[in-house]
Image (cartoon, rainbow, N blue to C red):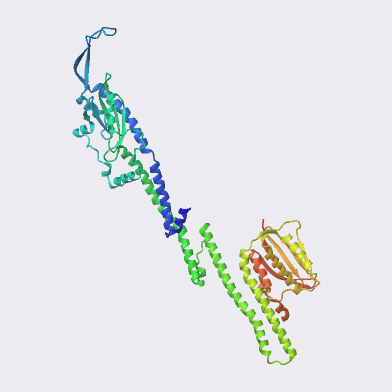
Amino acid sequence: MRIFKIIQGSPVSLSARILLLNLLALILLLVGILYLNQFRQSLIEAKVEALETQSQIISTTISASATSSKGANLFVFDRNIAEGDGFNQRVIKYRNYTINKKLLEQIIGQLIDPKTLNAKIYDSTNKLIHESNQFFLEQKVATFPISEIENKSFFWSIYNKLMKLFALDSIKHLDYVTDQNALSNALDGSKNIVVNKNESGQAVVQVSVPIIKFKAIIGFLVLSTQSDTIDMIVYEERAAIMKVFAVASIITIILSLILSNTIAKPMRELAKAADEVRNNLNLRKKIPDFNRRNDEIGNLSSALNNMTVTLLNRIDTIEKFSADVAHELRNPLTSLRSAIEAFPVIKNKNERLELIRIIKEDIDRIDRLISDISESSKLDTALTMEEREIIDIYEFLYELIELQNSRYKTNGIILNQDERGIKLYSIINRDRLNQVFINLFDNARSFSNSNDSICVTLKNDDDDIFIEVSDLGGGIQGTKIDRIFDRFYTDREKDTEAKMHSGLGLSIVKQIVDSHKGEISVENFEIDLKKGARFKIRLPKHT
């Protein structure tokens, strides 16, 4: 987690992070492959097995075909030894064999590949009598010693340094002797294996075996790999891995750039557009639209566009609301100012009392406007923060209507449902939706006669719940009846009634319904020669 915080807090751009992290993952994979790769160890072990077999073959061949003697020798037993069983003669004839250098050179020339092997033959006194590298050099069969790896190219030098830096050329983990002196133990009749490094740091495998003629050890053979045999094969194998890594790196860089162009570039455009909108609200239409992309960038673009539109609409609404508030407050203030200015002039007591009444009404209206304006201005924020729950709309309306009918003895409310027993669930805030219907019921009562009922009808389809609130209060006047949802708009004919209502009740109703992703509308109707208004609310159904 700390690594992610460091990466997130770094000043590096998103494009650079994508490129670096992808390359880092590839580099770690490469290092892991090289570090865990057992090819070098397996190759050394294979070379040991091969040299063991070859050394046995060559030593046997030398014993059979490259030895000679200068004649027979006699061995005389001590005459003082008492005669006994097994001693039929006192003199034994035997031959003293030695390794013939000329015959040895012929055999070595046929059995040794100078490019991969070097053979050294020692006599029984541990004296070197033949070395294949020197022999082939004199015969001009090949040029020895073979050129060192680090001199082959600049890349060889880098490779060797990296191998030493990461200890990938170590032989400490191998279970073989590293002491060169152990090779001479072959004079005791044993087979010896030594794995060590030469002066150039290259791995060399050496195997020594005795050369036996008629059970007598006449010398020993040391068979070893050439200086760069093992490391050359390992290098080629790792070079192949490096080539794959190089190709993979190029592909990773290209894909990272494509990914960066796919992710980082749109995000930069969105960030730039957001800054431009912040500095100049007139640039609201310049926000890039990536909705065609079915991914997180598309979702981000859509969310940013929606957020910007909502924010700008909110700003427009606040500006309009401020203008409406100023206009609505100006009317009672103007009336109040006129009454105050006329008060000193008027001497008639009754007229003064009338002015005092007007002043009180205007003050009450201002107080009511301020209260309603305060509630309306807080509503937007409250609606976005309040929790909602899944509620059965029928049970919710039933409880509310029962409470209303018990509180108000006039204008009884009737609840009708098309299909009884069906649960109609919706995700709502109970208090806010409660406020919606209380405002609608209060509005219906204010227009209706005391003996008129208010009818609530509940319907539904596969996706939505429909609620209708109808009254017989004469309907909505004018042609643009939807204006009754505008702030401070009132449809009341009498000026005294208009003063009692701020015109915010139905506006708050629409605000709450819209926040629940619903819709509200109104229409006029006529039944039994009575006109009325019907408010229609649609709420999304929760299934």
Please give left or right for residue 58 compared with residue 446 in the image: left
In the image, is residue 42 above or below residue 419? above
Please give left or right for residue 173 compared with residue 79 in the image: right
- Whole-percent x, y for residue 255 in the image: 43, 53
Q: Is residue 320 visible?
A: yes
In the image, is residue 379 above or below residue 390? below
Q: Residue at x 67, y 61 (%)?
A: 428
Please give left or right for residue 77 compared with residue 527 in the image: left
Please give left or right for residue 12 compared with residue 538 in the image: left
Q: Residue at x 64, y 61 (%)?
A: 387
Q: Nearer the viewer, residue 253 or 324?
A: 324
Locate residue 495: give its quadrant: bottom right
Q: Is residue 292 visible?
A: no
- Whole-percent x, y for residue 507 in the image: 66, 71
- Whole-percent x, y for residue 155 in the image: 30, 47
Q: Residue at x 68, y 81 (%)?
A: 363
Q: Nearer the viewer, residue 127 or 416?
A: 127
The quadrant of the picture occupied by the C terminus is: bottom right
Q: Nearer the viewer, residue 421 or 191?
A: 191
Locate residue 501: give its quadrant: bottom right
Marker count (numbered): 0
- Whole-percent x, y for residue 14 in the image: 44, 58
Locate residue 85: give its quadrant: top left
* Residue located farthest toward the front when viewing the structure as drawn: 80
